[in-house]
Image (cartoon, helix red, strand yellow):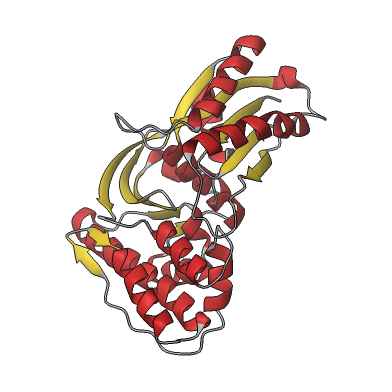
Amino acid sequence: MSLYLGIDTSNYTTSLALYDDATKQMFRRQKLLPVKKGELGLRQSDAVYHHTAALHNLFCDLVKDIDTSQIVCIGASSRPRPVEGSYMPCFLVGLNSAKILAAALKIPMFEFSHQEGHISAALFSAKKDELFNRDFIAFHVSGGTTEAVFAKGYGSGFSLEMCAKSLDLHAGQAVDRVGLMLGLDFPCGAQLESLALNNTEKIKVRPTLKGCNCCLSGIENQCKKLFEQNRSREYIAAYCIEYIRCSLEAMTDELIKKFGQLPLLYAGGVMSNTIIKNSFTKKYNAVFAQPSFSTDNAAGTAYLAYRKFNNV
């Protein structure tokens, strides 16, 4: 048995994972970074502080019943996306911790992007390893990213090329801004979905597309108007989610025209929404991560480390 450690210190979650190649199990520890009530997020300096404070305790809890000599390599998220110039200070906490552990244990350490980790976590949790050897389209939809990438699997991993994106607001930003307007707590995704599921009114939206790219700033503007018109919280929540769903659907249809009928994968925190998942599973037979693997987590990074170490 060998163990593969993954570390991810993203903008809102401190996350550790261990993959056991004998049992195929993924052991995880996560902690959401604290955000003050009414605020939309954290400054990077605050995120770095909270990651530094949380990482040690999470690691100790993860390995308390583990023989650490069985850890054969470490994977860490080092940047948001796998492109030149992609950088966010909070990832340095996990990356430097991984380098220290790798040096102490005398084992290799591999760097991956946060986006690669999200896609890997989705493939792992959906049991879709075959896509590591195929071309596919992957959407990464979260508070910091709304992108579609052309993924080319090569066994131990995949290369990513961006092929569509939001030209303004990210989907997760829209969810949180509308959620806070409705009095919800950050992060607002799960609460907004609960409200939307209780809506009984019909909704019509007209998404804005420019080529394969979308524009999402209209969500916030329209929801403010609905709020000022005293529409129900349930209706406003459902409108926000339906606008995102329709925008992603329009992007997907354009990408199918461009690339053909490739497998479709949706990853990132916003993609844990069951309304969007049920719609796209029915229409596209799309692949989604299990909900607990949709949020920022180190599982995908641990699994990438396993695949790269063994040249799967």
Judge by depth and name the residue closer to the eye, 44 or 75. 44
Query: Could you tell me if residue 20 is visible in this image?
Result: no
Percent x, y of residue 254: 22, 62
Q: Is residue 108 above or below residue 204?
A: above
Percent x, y of residue 249: 33, 67
Report the number of discs: 0
Q: Is residue 121 above or below residue 77?
A: below
Q: Is residue 107 above or below residue 124?
A: above
Q: Is residue 55 left or right of residue 226?
A: right
Residue furthest left in the image? 211
**Quadrant in the picture for residue 67:** top right
Percent x, y of residue 143: 44, 53
Judge by depth and name the residue closer to the eye, 231 or 207. 231
**Quadrant in the picture for residue 16:** top right
Percent x, y of residue 4: 62, 27
Residue at the image position 26 percent from the left and 61 percent from the top: 214
Residue at the image position 59 percent from the left and 62 percent from the top: 185
Residue furthest right in the image? 65
Q: Is residue 59 above or below residue 121?
A: above
Query: Could you tell me if residue 277 is visible in this image?
Result: yes
Residue at the image position 48 percent from the left and 44 percent from the top: 118
**Quadrant in the picture for residue 1:** top right
Judge by depth and name the residue closer to the eye, 24 or 197. 197
Residue at the image position 56 percent from the left and 77 percent from the top: 195
